[in-house]
Amino acid sequence: MTAAPWTLHCTACAYTVPGDRLASVCPDCGQPLSVKLAPVPRTAVTSAPDMWRYAAAMPILDGETRVSVGEGMTPLVELPELAADAGVARFWVKDEGLNPTASFKARGLCMAVTRAKALGLSGVCVPTAGNAGIALSAYAAAAGMKARIYAPKTTPPPILGSIRAYGAELELVDGHIGDAGKATMQFAKDSGFFNVATVREPYRVEGMKTMGYELAEQLAWALPDAIVYPTGGGEGTIGIWKAFREMIDWGWLPKDTALPKMIAAQAAGCAPLVRAFNAGEEKATPWENPVTHASGLRVPGPFGDRWTLRTLRESKGGAFAVDEEKMRTSTFRLASSSGIDAAPEGGCGLAVAGMAREAGLISSDARVVVFNTGSGASYRW
């Protein structure tokens, strides 16, 4: 294999390793690894109609196969009516539900499977609250690889049906995604399949960061004042922030560009990051008895908790939790006022935008982007 022009760095200690080898978490401290690439100019962005327009800024070698089915370049929709609701000057929704596998997870699993394929792996596995399972199943099918998915029995049936349709092996477990995670780790140990769980390998974040590049490009290479991101495992929030820092460091944006406040939106019935953020803690204590109809937010013990909390604080952002009824009302409001097929996670984001304004975290003249992270169709049965 050709030496990779990137390195992997621990997000918590001094460990570093070349990027030309299979890697999971840091072997010294057990925390996530992050990719560091050499700077590339903004002129390297191509006219490709998907996230691969940013291939020069992604960990892929010339000539390597991109395991792709058209992910990325999702719409950024401005909604003046919802700006008024939130009490801000301008308001956009970035609709990730229009990705090939109906959620933002397509970006991360596309990149993870691309690297797994390049490294010669034959099988991959993942625990899922739903959307990651669909994405891994689809990209493994596209790559000709085997996939095993572990999901809670409470996962919405349309999501489970999609996983089965892509030909992956599906195992249902009692409990929540944390229980699925334990089963996945045991299976990976016993089978030799590679575990691509959220931030337990370094490349899913590299796919996620393309949301940050896209957002800047869609806003004519500018950034909003605040971004509200529905947050379960944290990789979307982490990835977008990584993209912003890269764009500043690489000269894609002026050095004095003001970076957005990153605001995490969670469900009141499963809000470990909100609790940790408000308590000033560096890591999150797992949430007991997680309950929410937004399955993507039912992540009681996110492995990327330290990295996510650090991102929120570096950005001078925040974290808010929404109760189930408010989430349902906001989801309906988002869908019925815009035509966007909003998932409950998107409704959670809309509600949090208003909460952040009421709390004074964002001002009345702010430009705010809320991410709808998945399709509402996945929740209807």
Image (cartoon, rainbow, N blue to C red):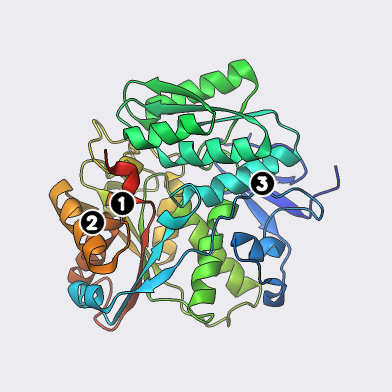
Q: Which x, y percent locates residue 34?
A: 61, 50
The quadrant in which the C terminus is found is top left
The residue lying at 20 percent from left, 64 percent from top is: 355
**Secondary structure at numbered mark 1:** loop
- Amino acid marked by disc 3: Val
Q: Label 2 belongs to which residue?
A: 331
Disc sitting over residue 2 in the figure: none
Q: Do the residues labelled 3 and 2 touch (CB within 8 Å)?
A: no
Tell me if residue 302 comes above or below residue 69 in the rendering. Answer: above
| Label 3 or label 2, whichever comes before in sequence order | 3
Q: Categorize mark 2 by other alpha carbons within 10 Å: few (<14), some (14-19), many (20+).
A: many
Res. 224 image quadrant: bottom left
The reply to whether callout 2 and callout 1 are in contact (CB within 8 Å) is yes
Q: Looking at this view, is 31 or 331 the one in front? A: 331
Which residue shows up at 16% across the image and 49% down it? 323
Q: Name the residue under label 1.
A: 343
> Is 120 drawn above or below residue 284 in the view shown?
above
Tag 3 secondary structure: loop
Q: Position of residue 108 (x, y in %)?
A: 55, 48
Picture residue at 27% right of the left edge, 45% below the top: 271
Place residue 287 in its image quadrant: top left
Check disc 3 and report the residue beneath it. Answer: 67
Res. 312 in view: yes
Give the Cα separation between the discs numbered 1 and 3.
26 Å
Q: Distance between the residues labelled 2 and 1?
A: 7 Å
Name the quadrant containing residue 357: bottom left
Residue 365 relative to residue 151: left or right: left
> Residue placed farthest to the top in the image?
190
Residue type pointed to by label 2: Thr
- At 47% across and 36% down in the image, what residue appears? 133
Q: Where is residue 347 in the image (x, y as percent from the top left)?
A: 26, 56
The answer to which of marks 2 and 1 sits earlier in the sequence is 2
